[in-house]
Image (cartoon, rainbow, N blue to C red):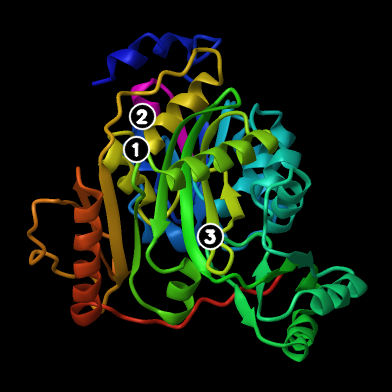
Amino acid sequence: MLPARRAAMVGAMSTSSRPLNILALACFNTGDRFIARARDRGARVWLITQETYLKKKRWRRDLLEDVFALPDHAPIADTINAVSYLARNVKFDRIVPFDDVEVDPAARLREHLRVPGMGDTTARVFRDKLAMRVRAEEEGIAVPDFVGLIHHDDIRDYTERVPPPWMLKPRTEASATGIRKIGSVEELWRAIHELGDRASYFLLERFLPGDVHHVDAIVTEGKVVFAEVHKNGVPPFDVAHGGGVFSTYTLPRDTAEWRELEALNEKMLTRMHFVRGVTHAEYIRGRDDGKVYFLEVGARVGGAHVADVVEAATGVNLWQEWADIEIDKGEVPYVLPPRRAEYAGLVQSLARSEHPDLSSFTDPEVCYRTDDPYHAGLIVRSQSQARVRELLDDYARRLTKDYLAVMPHYELPPLR
């Protein structure tokens, strides 16, 4: 049943008598809660994915008008042509990317079809790691020393000024995909020459040991109205490249650390002119100087079950709230639902079996078991942050011993 706080908004979802039409772009996240809320609000949702994910994911075909697939790594021109063909018969009112990799195509489609929402210029700052670092630095937000792999004299100056190791990062890949750790000038130039024409799509960044945090927020009309602050157990790069167990958990509330990250996140989103929607931003606290540095931000719900962790701790589902904000587009004042102030945490690893049996984890704090194939993961919830940390530490050891699988790190496909 539609919550009472939203019931009055249903009639405002469209300026015409027809239902609102939403086009979702998705590969990794299914966005089921977004789709379900949109349907509850009377909207119709179409979905475009890649061929690989057409059968790989369990799409909510019962809630979707239709599902279409494009060839993997199809050029953006093909995406524009395909959606323009669909638009001959369906007038799309909103275009929503469920993953990082769809932020750029969604912006290009909005520009091409003149659909309201984030356009190319703003989307670039929330997708391109070089663009977001340049903007953050211009706005006085600390970032690890970096340089784009474009002008070779700039790269030489950088290597003379900033000692190795460095992180070689693709500018538009999601998560830790394609990131390499570089230990010397010689290794760097070998990597640049190997990249060839792809080099300008990468940046170089000072390797900064420290603790990675993420802040997940809801923004409406340029104002951050909700933010949850978390800390990762092991940096995602280390898990992606070395194997192991990923964990993340809510930081203690009403602490200086929480307030510092919350304020920095609000400053970053304000300076980058984010108007409305949900964001997932990552920061690192340097081990040597204790300073917090901005790493990256995405204009979407965080992956790896981050939204489930947020919901376990607060009762707020980011996917549902995002649907409401997208539908209303500021025409109706956004109302944040009641929220809890508890603590939650996730522990997850690759598993040796497709559907690992997690029934031995019987603590009452377990509130969610992930169902991703070849993954073992649990979310715990408690009023005590210490209890969450205790359970995550115990579960990480058990997953490592009884479930953990390690696979080679994903390599980037050829540039098209």
Query: Residue 37 shows which numbered tag?
Result: 2
Q: Is residue 277 above or below residue 97?
A: above
**Percent from the top left, x then y, of residue 142?**
67, 53
| Front one among 243 and 267 | 267
Query: Residue 285 shows which numbered tag?
Result: 3
Q: Is residue 266 toward the left or the right of residue 302 in the image?
A: right
Residue at the disc numbered 1: 33
| Disc 2 to disc 1, C-alpha distance | 6 Å
Tell me the kind of residue under disc 1. Arg
Q: Nearer the viewer, mark 3 or mark 1?
A: 3
Q: Quick one: SS at disc 3? A: strand
Whether residue 69 is visible here, answered yes or no, is: no
N-terminal-most mark, 2 or 3? 2
The span picked out in magenta is: 37-46
Name the image quarter holding residue 401: bottom left
Q: Residue at x 34, y 36 (%)?
A: 317
Q: Is residue 258 toward the left or the right of residue 185 in the image?
A: left
Q: Is residue 239 above or below residue 216?
A: below
| Residue count near mark 3 (Cα–Cα under 10 Å), binned few <14, some 14–19, many ≥20 | some
Name the image quarter holding residue 119: top right
Q: Is residue 109 above or below residue 3?
A: below
Q: Nearer the viewer, mark 2 or mark 3?
A: 3
Badge count: 3
| Disc 2 to disc 3, C-alpha distance | 36 Å
Name the image quarter holding residue 369: bottom left
